[in-house]
């Protein structure tokens, strides 16, 4: 009966003191189970005529309960109360052990002393519990009093904070209005300066382009006509009756003349493409950003660049790898300008892997080389990260330092204007206020890194 009272009231005391039913439901279930287990042990003890075996089961039960309470931090504050039950358990254990091993006569001589010790231990236990409960109530009263004082102070603090916030809001509003006005003035000033610069540059560029393209058109047109005339002349020579040796000599001269005219036409068109690139490079952006699916835009231009190269080289093949951020959604960018950047980067990447394939075509070490162009997008921390990489020819450090300079190109004469990356750099850094970087290892590949603020 003493063990039942000890365990039952200890469990109830802990559940009430710590409010485990609300604060720790899972641990509370274990305490409720322990309470029912103590009731079951008491019932079994009397059902089996005060069985000694059932009586001894109380010790492992209480030991397990104390172990559970000591191994959970939630019960740290009541460990001293749990310890107060240990003297009673030790006295009971000594008495039961003495009853088990000592003769009846000797045990009866000490039985009264053991019962008295158990009674004092039990009284001391309940006295400690009562005192703890009393202290807890006093502490709760102090907390309640402190809570009321805190509420009064909090009310005064809230009133002062309200007045301060009202004044702060008014000052902040005035500051924001002034700042907005100042920003608008600066933006207007910058727009006027930029408009004037672009107007001057546009006029200059248009004048230069007009002056250059007029003679270019004459060169291209007359060189094409001259090629046709050479063909007609060759046909007329073949109709004449002059000696075959003379015919062959004249046809050789006509052939050389035709090839010269074709080269003039080729380089004239090359000059024309450079002029058009200059016009495109100097053209001012619309400056209008709109919600855009950057993943779809990149995928579209990637395939456009790929099929553009495939149209020139039917044997070219490359793996198109995409790793798009599916959670990105639409981002405010200038889609036309960003599309031009994608087209330039992908065109260069496919050119690099195609060149590596050609250069190592007969090299057994690169027999398993597979051209690959990859794009990665990721939206993180208010920034859009775009990576365009390839496993192509790569670039040495001397080339990387010049790659964004206008008119600088690594392609053979006639295959590049040197304006694509320069224009892309301006679009990313100026129009979108982002960054465009490049890392490359000669012979291994290149990666362009775009970072845009969102």
Image (tube, rainbow, N blue to C red):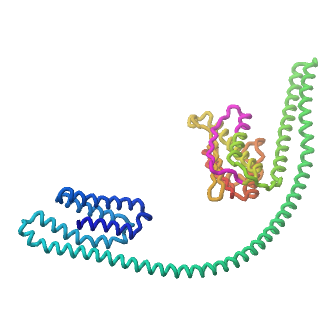
Q: Residue at x 74, y 34 (%)?
A: 311
Q: Nearer the viewer, residue 227 or 142?
A: 142
Q: Residue at x 90, y 47 (%)?
A: 212
**What percent of the width, then of the height, locates residue 89?**
22, 68
- Where is 240 relative to 446, above or below? above
Q: In this view, does 454 lie to the left or right of 150?
A: right
Residue 148 in sight from this viewpoint: yes
**What percent of the width, then of the height, locates residue 252?**
85, 27
- Please identify the residue farthest to the top as the structure is shown: 241
Q: Residue at x 72, y 74 (%)?
A: 172
Residue range corresponding to the magenta coloring: 306-331
**What percent of the width, then of the height, locates residue 271?**
84, 44
Q: Please state, as top left, top right, bottom left or bottom right, where the C terminus lies in the image.
A: bottom right
Q: Please state, as top left, top right, bottom left or bottom right, where the N terminus lies in the image.
A: bottom left
Q: Is residue 11 inside the magenta stretch?
A: no
Q: Which of 28 and 262 is in front in this view?
A: 28
- Where is 156 relative to 39, above or below? below
Q: Which of 87 and 284 is in front in this view?
A: 87
Where residue 416 sits, quadrant-wise, is top right
Residue 405 in sight from this viewpoint: no
Where residue 401 sits, quadrant-wise, is bottom right
Q: Is residue 203 left or right of residue 374?
A: right
């Amino acid at each position: 009966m003493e063990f039942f009272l000890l365990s039952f009231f200890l469990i109830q005391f802990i559940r009430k003191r710590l409010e485990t039913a609300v604060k720790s439901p899972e641990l509370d279930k274990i305490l409720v189970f322990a309470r029912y287990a103590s009731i079951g042990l008491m019932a079994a003890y009397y059902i089996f005529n005060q069985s000694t075996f059932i009586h001894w089961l109380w010790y492992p039960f209480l030991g397990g309960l104390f172990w559970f309470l000591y191994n959970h931090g939630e019960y740290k504050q009541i460990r001293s109360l749990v310890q107060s039950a240990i003297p009673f358990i030790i006295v009971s254990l000594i008495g039961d052990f003495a009853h088990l091993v000592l003769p009846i006569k000797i045990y009866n001589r000490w039985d009264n002393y053991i019962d008295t010790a158990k009674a004092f231990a039990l009284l001391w236990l309940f006295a400690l519990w009562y005192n703890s409960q009393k202290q807890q109530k006093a502490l709760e009263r102090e907390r309640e009093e402190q809570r009321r004082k805190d509420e009064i102070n909090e009310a005064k603090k809230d009133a002062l904070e309200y007045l301060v916030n009202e004044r702060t809001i008014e000052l902040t509003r005035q500051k924001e209005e002034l700042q907005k006005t100042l920003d608008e003035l600066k933006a207007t000033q910058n727009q006027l300066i930029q408009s004037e610069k672009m107007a001057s540059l546009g006029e200059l560029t248009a004048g230069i382009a007009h002056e250059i393209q007029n003679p270019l058109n004459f060169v291209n047109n007359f060189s094409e006509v001259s090629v046709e005339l050479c063909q007609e002349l060759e046909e007329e020579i073949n109709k004449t009756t002059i000696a075959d040796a003379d015919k062959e000599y004249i046809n050789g001269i006509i052939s050389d003349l035709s090839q010269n005219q074709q080269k003039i036409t080729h380089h004239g068109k090359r000059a024309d493409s450079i002029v058009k690139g200059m016009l495109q490079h100097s053209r001012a952006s619309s400056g209008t950003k709109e919600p855009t699916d950057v993943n779809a835009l990149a995928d579209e231009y990637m395939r456009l660049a790929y099929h553009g190269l495939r149209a020139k080289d039917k044997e070219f093949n490359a793996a198109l790898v995409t790793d798009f951020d599916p959670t990105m959604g639409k981002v405010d960018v200038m889609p036309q300008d960003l599309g031009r950047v994608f087209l330039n980067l992908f065109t260069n990447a496919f050119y690099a892997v195609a060149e590596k394939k050609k250069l190592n075509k007969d090299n057994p070490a690169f027999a398993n080389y597979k051209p690959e162009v990859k794009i990665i997008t990721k939206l993180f921390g208010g920034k859009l990260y775009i990576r365009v990489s390839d496993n192509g020819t790569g670039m040495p450090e001397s080339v990387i330092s010049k790659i964004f300079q206008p008119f600088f190109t690594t392609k053979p004469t006639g295959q590049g204007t040197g304006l694509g990356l320069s224009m892309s750099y301006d679009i990313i850094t100026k129009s979108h206020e982002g960054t465009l970087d490049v890392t490359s290892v000669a012979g291994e590949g290149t990666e362009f890194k775009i970072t845009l603020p969102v």
